[in-house]
Amino acid sequence: MNSSAPVTVTVTGAAGKIAYSLLFRVASGLVFGPDTPVRLRLLDVPTAVAAAEGVAMEIEDCALPLVDSIEITDEADVAFDGTNAAFLVGAMPRGKGMERSDLLSANGAIFRDQGRSINAGAADDIRVVVVGNPANTNAYIAHKHAPDVPAGRFTALMRLDHNRALSQLAARLVAPVAELDGVVVWGNHSATQFPDVSYLTRAGEPVTAGLERDWLVDTFIPRVANRGSEIIAVRGSSSAASAAGAAVDQMHDWVHGTPGQSWTTVALPSEGHYGTVPGVVTGLPCRSRGGEWEVVEGLAIDDFQRARIDASVAELVSERDAVHALNLTD
Ligand SMILES: NC(=O)C1=CN([C@@H]2O[C@H](COP(=O)(O)OP(=O)(O)OC[C@H]3O[C@@H](n4cnc5c(N)ncnc54)[C@H](O)[C@@H]3O)[C@@H](O)[C@H]2O)C=CC1
Ligand SMILES: O=C([O-])CC(=O)C(=O)O
């Protein structure tokens, strides 16, 4: 028997590839837990509503006990009314040869309008995970249009980068992923991101062998930072199931907490942490406590890290400036 009150969950881009993986995981209880029913709200554009209805029919056909209701709409105000958790996925994906920032002019207005709808109608405990690219700057736009919602309620997805880093490290060190901790991916969900192993531990002990600077600079950092492009080149379209899995991880940990002293990477509106520019939505090391993200404080930063973090934050600043030039914050 379900014991908790239902959670209202909005997924945008409901007819798209990521949502096709995400919705079934949410509906199965992987995010909010095995006792919490979900009221699903599926938002897509009018031309995709029929396809979203087909996805809803498939969710029905799974006879999942936690699905309280499914509502399909093309109106953002309806989709976000009273919502507790929003996955903002709906946006154009990039193709071969594009950078994610090339999507800003096509996708930015979506997040302006959805930020307004969240501000107008979402529940007080709203949690937002922005997936649609450029994710960090789209989260910035949505947050700017939701002045009544605390900034920390808007996050962008960098858990995929974090998971990619963990997976590459596990292979390098021949270690189970579960034994690794202390990774952070600073900056932007873009090729400038800085996957950082400076604080890496294995089974609680600092890792000293196998992470030579040459390997980090020439192989690890570019491999993780360009993994999205690599997937597009090999698969023919951008990551979908892995993106959905990372979005599940991020919302799950936000709701349920991170274990012990472990941390993960979350892109949050900066308050100037670690010398980052206030306001931009940057990847930071975070723990989840009491349903809130807390930035891990006090990590030492050396010159190499400083230069890498600053370069990626500079890109976020230029994206922020482009947002203003496109009048997307008016
Ligand atoms: N942050 C991350 O780690 C990742 C982000 N992405 C991004 O996620 C986004 C979605 O990717 P896919 O699902 O593969 O794309 P897709 O093209 O399969 O689906 C996108 C869906 O969004 C819908 N949509 C467009 N405008 C909308 C609006 N205003 N309101 C609601 N829905 C709208 C489309 O109709 C479509 O159904 C892309 O921008 C992609 O680049 C993809 C992978 C990882
Ligand atoms: O690379 C893309 O365009 C999709 C994405 O964000 C990723 O896979 O990290």
Image (tube, grey):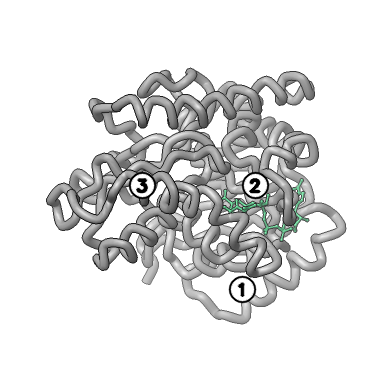
| Numbered label attached to residue 214 | 3
The answer to whether residue 140 is left or right of residue 151 is: right
Per the image, the residue denoted by label 1 is 59
Name the residue type under label 3.
Asp
Question: Of helix, strand and loop, which one carries label 2?
Answer: loop
| Residue 193 horizontal/vertical position (percent) | 49, 39
Name the residue type under label 1.
Ile
Residue 32 seen anywhere in this rendered image of the structure: yes
Binning the other alpha carbons within 10 Å of mark 2 as few (below 14), some (14 to 19) or many (20 upward) gives many
3 or 1: tag closer to the N-terminus: 1
| Numbered label attached to residue 285 | none
Residue drawn at 47 percent across, 50 percent down: 161
Per the image, the residue denoted by label 2 is 132
Question: Of helix, strand and loop, which one carries label 3?
Answer: helix
Whether pointer 3 and pointer 1 mark residues with C-beta atoms closer than 8 Å, the reply is no
The answer to whether residue 202 is left or right of residue 307 is: left
1 or 2: tag closer to the N-terminus: 1
Name the residue type under label 2.
Gly
Which marked residue is nearer to the observer: mark 2 or mark 3? 3
| Residue 263 horizontal/vertical position (percent) | 29, 44
